[in-house]
Image (cartoon, rainbow, N blue to C red):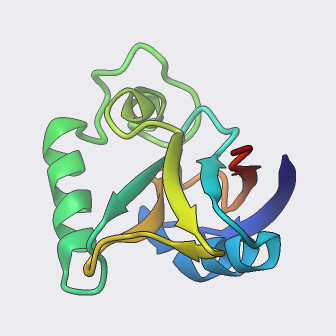
Amino acid sequence: MKSTVIKVSTGRTEVVRDITPQCASFARDAGGDGLLHIFVPHATAGIAIMELGARSDDDLLAALRDLLPADDRWRHAHGSPGHGRSHVMPALIPPYGTVPVIDGALTLGTWQSIALVDLNVDNPDRQVRLSFLRDGA
């Protein structure tokens, strides 16, 4: 298995950050066939495979605001108002994803991208672990 950690700056706002280029570069350098596993080791972030750039990312953030409002209902109540919702989000958008790789290329669908989803405005710097599991056949 080949593995690396990339650093992603998410800033101080809710964000859906495209990490497809970094994932594609890592898969290309690893070469061959296998699986790319993407994992964010943070309790308040997730990985989504979805269309980006056509305002779908804005739609996702709007849906999360509806489902997980940034108010005082959360029992986990340190940090910014509504911080507890950031700890619930990974149950909806998991902190991992896996993409097949063929001959060093991600096999995403035409409109699919890999995104880091982060509602936590208190932590502007994230790490994402990329692991390539080579086909043993």
Question: Quick check: 55 above or below 121?
Answer: below
Q: Residue at x 22, y 59 (%)?
A: 60
Quarter of the image with the C terminus is top right
Horizontal side of 52 relative to 88 (left or right) equals: left
Question: Quick check: 101 above or below 78?
Answer: below
Residue 67 in the image, given as x and y percentages of width and height: 17, 37
Quarter-of-image position of residue 130: bottom right
Q: Residue at x 66, y 38 (%)?
A: 42
Q: Farthest residue in the front direction?
A: 137
Q: Residue at x 80, y 78 (%)?
A: 29
Residue 111 in the image, given as x and y percentages of width and height: 25, 79
Residue 58 in the image, given as x and y percentages of width and height: 23, 72
Quarter-of-image position of residue 125: bottom right
Horizontal side of 79 relative to 14 (left or right) equals: right
Quarter-of-image position of residue 16: bottom left
Q: Residue at x 19, y 72 (%)?
A: 56
Horizontal side of 94 relative to 20 (left or right) equals: left
Residue 82 in the image, given as x and y percentages of width and height: 38, 37
Question: Along the line of sight, which residue is nearer the eye, 65 or 77?
Answer: 65
